[in-house]
């Protein structure tokens, strides 16, 4: 006879435990779902045959009124077109000023907001059905086959890869161009500026609060910098757009008020508190005995900080910078508001730029569901996701391993 | 004389491992009913590990294993049909650091009872009083039963934990260095308690204080580096130990 | 005679001086930035921040009037987001801290997933919102409830899907905060409960959770603070610049952050719009900071207790 047999079946216990386990798996499921559903919308690119990829010509878009998310308000393009003439300090992608080299190509490729406008407003007037999934890409392809002839005569249908690696990004034109090179350059430009500004500032400030600041100052400085992290990025973008842009233009006398450097500064404002927090944590986590040993040997505070503590905290500081890169790379609102939003394949930071994230942000509202443009935007999203995933994996695995090894004396 | 006493719990060649590291080596020990059995030894020698194996608190740690037999009332405690929560209701435990729940004194005592369903208030009141009396705490707290238990002094808190352990009427009471965080006066009170409580329960005590073991226990086991060096009546261990290591430890040559 | 001064060569002392100066300068520069931002917004927008601004609807295509609908929209958004996200985050944190064996693959996967989620760019969440919530769940719901997958009731951008998207986005924030609160409960309390014959769930429910309520609260508030300011994730999942009078789960809604974005980038009259932009910013900042400060305050009280 076992006196320790269970007296009750503990059903509630099992239910509770399994409910919690299942809910905990939501995180994993969500990551998985993001993979699936973001990639899924991009797969239409690879599945559709070449003929269909010609389909989204402007005339085709007239049949399917683009899925605007603001049917009762003017679309972004329409607004911007209205502004172009007013010539305010709003940023407008002005083809005449910048696209001179590209303009030598066939002229129907110049991004002409007015041309698009007439199409979309025409469609709006006709009160066409907003979107109709049954009207697959096949229909407009047939309908537009006559108009499509002229472009196909000029260039044989390029492979998807060729088109994605082109140097012109003009999704809204007679022959849409999805060359991602300008986007890549734009993202790289702004991220580099952001990191070059933000990482040193963040790390130095972390050094200061961890080792040089007297206690009372530390208790003011640390929360103040962390307060910066609480600013929504739309507010930072606004600040750059209105204040920093003008300020910088006054000082540097640049042609373009909104450009990569303004955007980079804005991005650095989000990078700084991130790098600061993580670096400060890493620096504080270095065992105090190390610091005391160094000081006991006659080093000064600054020698100890820069030559003993900082190297000891290197994996953590490196992780901080990596995370800062990830943050700058994926940031949308600031890129939308402060970079000038023009996909120029130029490395000059005084010229406007367009990042991957901003591309999705500004064009997603205007795309036709299921169209090639839609698929490409999702493709960009997938790339962003994979990049951040990879960055996180590296930080987790590599950096943590280094940290563990270092403190185990291997 | 020891052969006549009923055995409440015993182990046979009991070894215990944290992962691949062995912590206990073939421990064979009887624990006699209504007696106080004490385990002494330097820190890290495995006595706490052994104690926690009796009510399977070590199961909470990842990767632990054991070999050998651990029996209570003739039943293998690690058998597959043993329900751990039922086991723990029959084997009470008092920890080194007093751990009152951040609730009222009354709620602390009734916690164990409420785990198996609600009981009428009259019954609960009665059990609260008897448990607190048995822990020699009733007079001190009877007027503030519904105040927070955290307002009690260290010694009172530990006695509260004893009352709480006793409230569910276990057969065995395990005590893991119960006085190490207490002042001498509170320690004295708890030691008095232990001597009274053994009439109702079987007590197994771990202590790093040799004198306490000498004062309070009937049987003593000396642990060293995971092995049981010697086990005998307390008087024998402390006056004429058989093993040299025991004698060295008792006389303070190490530890 | 031992002297303790001047053991460093003069040039090293200058380096030392600059080393510290540079670090201090960095800190000062960052704070200067913070102050200038706050200052600009306050000076520019404080006078426009009137009671009528806060309680009226916008007029004249958002060039005049108030931002009341945006405030309401934002409030509803974070409310629903909390209802959806906090239970999931709390349960996940409970699993990680109370049930998970450190060596188990599942536990490590959950942790990795949470860390990954924390690093995903918010715009990708927006795409997820469209691709999964609107296009998949929404259409599915339409099909199930109305028998027509294109009924455009659930299968469209709306407040509901924005809340769901933000709930997913702020999940890591909640999880981290709740875990911290759970860890603050001493291990001994759990052991005492288990030693009395309580099951793990009984211990969690009766000992651990009551002591972690403040942490759960902190986590929720931090998540709300994060969600209230997040625009990129809901940019095309349901926000609108001007609203009809309908306000419902399946409708679009106005939102403070989005409102600021459109005001800042699309106003036809920049002069007129500037004070409005500043005022809107102040409201958004006030909301965000209030939430963050409350959370930090609660958290510091919690830390002081333990």
Image (spheres, rainbow, N blue to C red):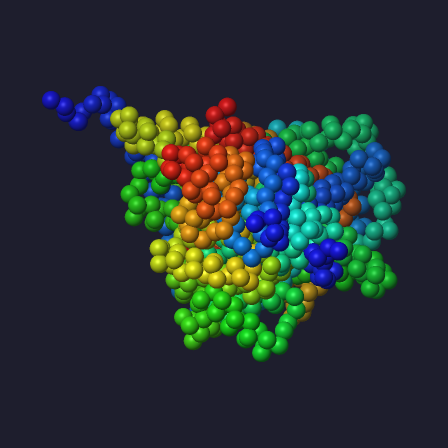
Q: Residue at x 83, y 37 (%)?
A: A48
Q: Residue at x 81, y 27 (%)?
A: A156
Q: How many marks?
A: 0
Between C169 and A119, the one lying in front of the other is C169
Between C23 and A48, the one lying in front of the other is C23
Q: Is residue C106 above or below residue C294?
A: above
Report x, y in % for residue A76.
Answer: 63, 51
Q: Residue at x 71, y 43 (%)?
A: A32
Report x, y in % for residue B151.
Answer: 41, 65
Between A207 and B77, the one lying in front of the other is B77
Q: Where, by quadrant of the figure, is residue B249 drawn?
A: top left
User: Could you tell me if residue B29 is visible in this image?
Assistant: yes
Q: Residue at x 41, y 39 (%)?
A: B250
Q: Is residue A134 above or below residue B14?
A: below
Report x, y in % for residue A355.
Answer: 59, 38
Q: Furthest-left residue in view?
A: C1
User: Which corner quadrant holds the N terminus of chain A?
Assistant: bottom right
User: Could you tell me if residue A103 is visible in this image?
Assistant: no
Horizontal side of B239 relative to A174 (left or right) equals left
Report x, y in % for residue B199.
Answer: 53, 62
Horizontal side of C28 relative to A186 (left or right) equals left
Between A357 and B29, the one lying in front of the other is B29
Horizontal side of B104 relative to C233 (left or right) equals left
Q: Where, by quadrant of the figure, is residue C256 drawn?
A: bottom right
């Amino acid at each position: 006879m076992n006196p320790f047999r269970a007296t009750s079946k503990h059903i509630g216990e099992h239910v509770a435990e399994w409910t919690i386990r299942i809910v905990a798996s939501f995180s994993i499921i969500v990551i998985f779902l993001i993979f699936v559903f973001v990639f899924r919308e991009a797969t239409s690119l690879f599945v559709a045959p070449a003929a269909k990829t010609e389909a989204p010509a402007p005339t085709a878009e007239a049949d399917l009124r683009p899925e605007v998310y603001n049917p009762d308000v003017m679309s972004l393009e329409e607004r911007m077109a209205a502004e172009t003439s007013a010539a305010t300090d709003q940023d407008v992608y002005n083809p005449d000023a910048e696209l001179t080299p590209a303009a030598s190509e066939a002229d129907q490729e110049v991004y002409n907001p007015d041309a698009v406008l007439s199409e979309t407003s025409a469609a709006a007037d006709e009160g066409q059905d907003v979107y109709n999934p049954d009207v697959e890409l096949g229909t407009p392809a047939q309908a537009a086959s006559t108009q499509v002839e002229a472009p196909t005569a000029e260039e044989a249908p390029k492979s998807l890869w060729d088109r994605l690696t082109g140097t012109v990004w003009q999704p809204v034109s007679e022959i849409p161009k999805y060359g991602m090179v300008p986007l890549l350059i734009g993202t790289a430009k702004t991220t580099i500026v952001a990191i070059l500004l933000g990482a040193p500032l963040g790390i130095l400030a972390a050094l200061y609060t961890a080792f040089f600041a007297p206690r009372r100052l530390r208790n003011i400085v640390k929360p103040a910098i962390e307060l910066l992290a609480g600013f929504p990025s739309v507010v930072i973008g606004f600040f750059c757009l209105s204040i920093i842009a003008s300020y910088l233009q006054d000082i540097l006398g640049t042609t373009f008020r909104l450009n990569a450097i303004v955007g980079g500064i804005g991005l650095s404002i989000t990078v700084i508190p991130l790098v600061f927090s993580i670096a400060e944590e890493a620096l504080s986590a270095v065992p105090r005995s190390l610091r005391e040993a160094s000081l006991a040997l006659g080093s000064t505070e600054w020698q100890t900080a820069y030559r003993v503590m900082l190297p000891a905290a290197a994996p953590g500081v490196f992780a901080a910078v990596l995370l800062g890169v990830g943050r700058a790379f994926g940031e949308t609102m600031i890129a939308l508001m402060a970079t000038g939003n023009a996909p120029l394949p130029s490395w000059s930071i005084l010229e406007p730029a367009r990042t991957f994230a901003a591309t999705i942000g500004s064009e997603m509202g205007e795309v036709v569901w299921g169209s090639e443009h839609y698929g490409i935007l999702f493709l960009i999203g997938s790339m962003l996701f994979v990049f951040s995933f990879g960055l996180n994996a590296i930080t987790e695995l590599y950096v943590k391993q280094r940290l563990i090894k270092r403190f185990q004396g291997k | 004389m020891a052969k006549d006493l009923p055995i409440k719990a015993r182990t046979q060649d009991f070894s215990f491992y944290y992962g691949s590291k062995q912590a206990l080596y073939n421990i064979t020990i009887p624990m006699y009913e209504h007696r106080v059995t004490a385990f002494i030894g330097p820190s890290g020698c495995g006595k706490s590990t052994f104690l926690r194996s009796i009510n399977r608190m070590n199961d909470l740690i990842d990767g632990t294993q054991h070999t050998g037999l651990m029996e209570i009332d003739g039943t293998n405690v690690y058998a597959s049909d043993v329900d751990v929560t039922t086991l723990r209701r029959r084997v009470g435990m008092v920890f080194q650091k007093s751990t009152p729940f951040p609730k009222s004194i009354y709620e602390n005592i009734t916690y164990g009872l409420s785990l198996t369903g609600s009981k009428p208030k009259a019954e609960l009141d009665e059990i609260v009083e008897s448990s607190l009396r048995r822990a020699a705490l009733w007079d001190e707290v009877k007027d503030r039963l519904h105040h927070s238990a955290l307002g009690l002094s260290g010694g009172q808190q530990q006695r509260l934990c004893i009352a709480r352990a006793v409230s569910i009427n276990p057969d065995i009471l395990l005590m893991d260095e119960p006085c190490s965080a207490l002042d001498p006066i509170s320690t004295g009170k708890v030691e008095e308690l232990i001597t009274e409580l053994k009439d109702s329960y079987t007590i197994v005590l771990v202590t790093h204080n040799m004198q306490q073991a000498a004062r309070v226990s009937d049987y003593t086991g000396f642990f060293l580096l995971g092995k049981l060096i010697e086990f005998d009546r307390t008087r024998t261990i402390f006056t004429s130990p058989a093993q040299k290591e025991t004698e060295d430890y008792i006389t303070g040559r190490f530890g | 005679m031992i002297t303790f001064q001047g053991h460093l060569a003069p040039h090293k002392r200058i380096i030392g001086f600059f080393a510290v100066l540079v670090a201090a300068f960095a800190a000062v520069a960052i704070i200067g930035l913070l102050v200038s931002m706050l200052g600009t917004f306050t000076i520019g927008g404080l006078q426009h921040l009137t009671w009528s601004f806060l309680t009226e609807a916008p007029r004249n295509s958002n060039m005049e009037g108030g931002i009341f609908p945006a405030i309401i929209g934002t409030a509803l958004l974070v409310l629903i987001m909390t209802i959806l996200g906090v239970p999931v985050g709390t349960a996940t944190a409970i699993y990680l801290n109370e049930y998970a064996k450190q060596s188990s693959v599942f536990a490590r996967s959950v942790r990795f997933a949470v860390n990954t989620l924390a690093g995903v760019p918010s715009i990708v969440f927006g795409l997820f919102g469209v691709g999964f919530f609107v296009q998949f769940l929404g259409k599915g719901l339409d099909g199930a409830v109305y028998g027509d997958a294109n009924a455009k009731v659930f299968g469209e951008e709306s407040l509901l899907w924005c809340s769901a998207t933000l709930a997913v986005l702020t999940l890591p924030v909640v999880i981290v905060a709740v875990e911290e609160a759970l860890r603050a409960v001493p291990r001994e309390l759990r052991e005492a409960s288990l030693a009395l014959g309580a099951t793990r769930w009984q211990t969690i429910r009766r000992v651990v959770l009551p002591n972690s309520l403040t942490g759960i609260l902190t986590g929720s508030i931090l998540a709300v603070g994060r969600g209230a300011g997040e625009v990129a994730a809901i940019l095309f999942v349901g926000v609108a610049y001007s609203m009809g009078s309908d306000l419902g789960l399946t409708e679009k809604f106005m939102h403070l952050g989005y409102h600021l974005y459109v005001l800042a980038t699309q106003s036809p009259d920049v002069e007129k719009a500037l004070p409005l932009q500043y005022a809107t910013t102040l409201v958004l900042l006030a909301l965000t900071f209030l939430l963050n400060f409350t959370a930090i305050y609660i958290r510091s009280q919690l830390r002081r207790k333990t």
